[in-house]
Amino acid sequence: MREKIRRVLVVALGAATAIAMAVGPAQASAASPWANCPDGAVCLYPEGEDPPQYPSHTFWSYGAHNLQDQYNWHWILNNQYGGARAKLCSGPDGTGTCSDGMAPQTGWWVYFTPVNSVVLYLP
């Protein structure tokens, strides 16, 4: 990827765990395309696609985005900039148990079976 990559363990949505891949700190300027995820977007990739290549879902607007039929392991990349974050929630419309916010320029390898919505927001 663009910078040195390090692996960390995160806990997402209670008992489900995920391995997250974190890329160095976000730059002050706009992001650049990353694994075909456009600048300013959050991208979800097809089940089991590792490494991520072509997103199956691209989210652009702040707020909750409900998911259907997303199970097992997926990459989700936050290619937003300006401090914008994304979180994963077990319920629709950003309800239920939610993960910590995913920082800009960060990707997570997440077990999506309990995830029902992705929320984009500016803290």
Image: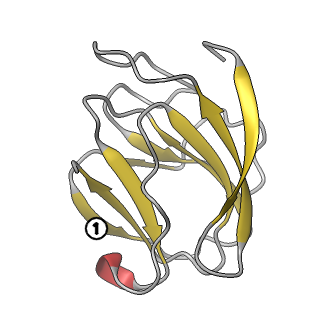
- When asked about the image quadrant of residue 65, the answer is bottom left
Which residue is at 59% across, 27% downward? 23
Q: Position of residue 74 (x, y in %)?
A: 67, 56
Q: Position of residue 58 (x, y in %)?
A: 40, 46
Res 46 seen here: no
**Which is more toward the observer, 86 or 76?**
86
Instruction: Identify the coloring.
Output: secondary structure
- When asked about the image quadrant of residue 71, the answer is bottom right
Res 88 seen here: yes
**Quadrant, the N terminus:** top right
**Which is more toward the observer, 119 or 56?**
119
Where is 78 relative to 28, above or below? Answer: below
User: Dot 1 corresponds to which residue?
Assistant: 64
Q: Position of residue 99 (x, y in %)?
A: 50, 67
**Which is more toward the observer, 36 or 40?**
40
Total of numbered circles in the picture? 1
Structural crowding at the residue carrying mark 1, measured as other residues with C-alpha within 10 Å and reported as few (<14), some (14–19) or many (≥20): many
Which residue is at 30% across, 54% downward? 120
Where is 22 relative to 45, above or below? Answer: above
Where is 6 relative to 60, above or below? Answer: above
Which residue is at 41% across, 44% downward? 42
